Amino acid sequence: MFERLVDQREAGIQILDLQTHRLSSVPGSKGLSSPSWSPDGRYIAAILPSDKLVLFDFTTQKWVELGRMSAGVGFDTWSRDGKHIYFESYRADPAIFRIGVSNRKLERVVSLKDVRLTGDIDWGFTLDPEDSPLILRDVSAQEVYAFDWEAP
């Protein structure tokens, strides 16, 4: 079996046309990660390795910077109405933020400072139907029990 490793700096966003089975590259998407479509299909949000959240507008065929977080950006997800992009900041003070697509207003939605999250920094989150963040909390390793058991 042949396995090919892809350098993240060389990777880009490609779109598969399901009718023609052709791939097309999104211009200027080399090195971007975590792409997500807007609900109306007009935009793609993505993350640069430099902790920038960027937006590609299919009408203008241009990328614009929405915001930058020194504390890291991850797991971008769109609000149902497409007016905001929610994302996590996961370093010193973990939190979920949202940024307005039209006004670039950044808001902290919830702090996750005292929440024990699962896994490493790649815990992620999603939104419920009302755009409230849903996270997976780790409660499994808080207490350890030992049981005496005798086999029948």
Image: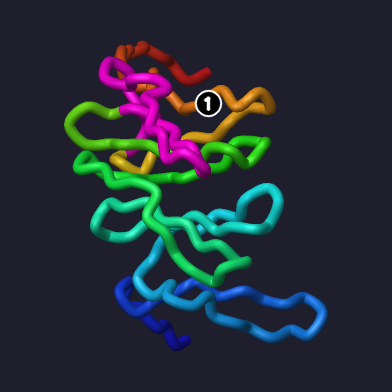
Image-quadrant location for residue 72: top left
95 horizontally vs 126: left or right? left
- Looking at the rendered structure, the number of numbered marks drawn on it comes to 1
Colour logic: rainbow
> On the image, which quarter does residue 17 sit in?
bottom right
9 lies above or below 63: below
Residue 124 appears in the rendering:
no
In the rendered view, tell whether residue 138 sits above or below residue 120.
above
Of residues 14 and 134, which is closer to you in this image?
14
The amino acid marked with disc number 1 is: Leu
Q: Residue at x 37, y 37 (%)?
A: 88
Q: Which residue is drawn at 57% across and 42% down?
A: 78
- SS state under label 1: strand
- Percent of width and height locating residue 116: 32, 21
Residue range highlighted in magenta: 95-119
Crowd around label 1: few <14 · some 14–19 · many ≥20 (10 Å): few
Q: Where residue 44 sits: x, y (%)?
A: 55, 58
What residue do we see at 47% from left, 39% from top? Answer: 103
Relative vertical location of residue 60 with respect to residue 113 in this rendering, above or below: below
Q: Look at the image and say whether residue 48 sits in the magenta stretch.
A: no
Q: Is residue 31 above or below residue 150?
A: below
Q: Which residue lies furthest to the right in this view?
A: 19
**Residue 129 at least partly seen:** yes
Q: Where is residue 127 in the image (x, y as percent from the top left)?
A: 58, 31
Q: Which quadrant of the structure image shows residue 64?
A: bottom left
Q: In this view, does 114 lie to the left or right of 57?
A: left
Residue under numbered circle 1? 134
Image x and y of residue 56, in percent:
51, 62
Is 83 placed left or right of 68 in the picture? right
130, 126: nearer the viewer = 130
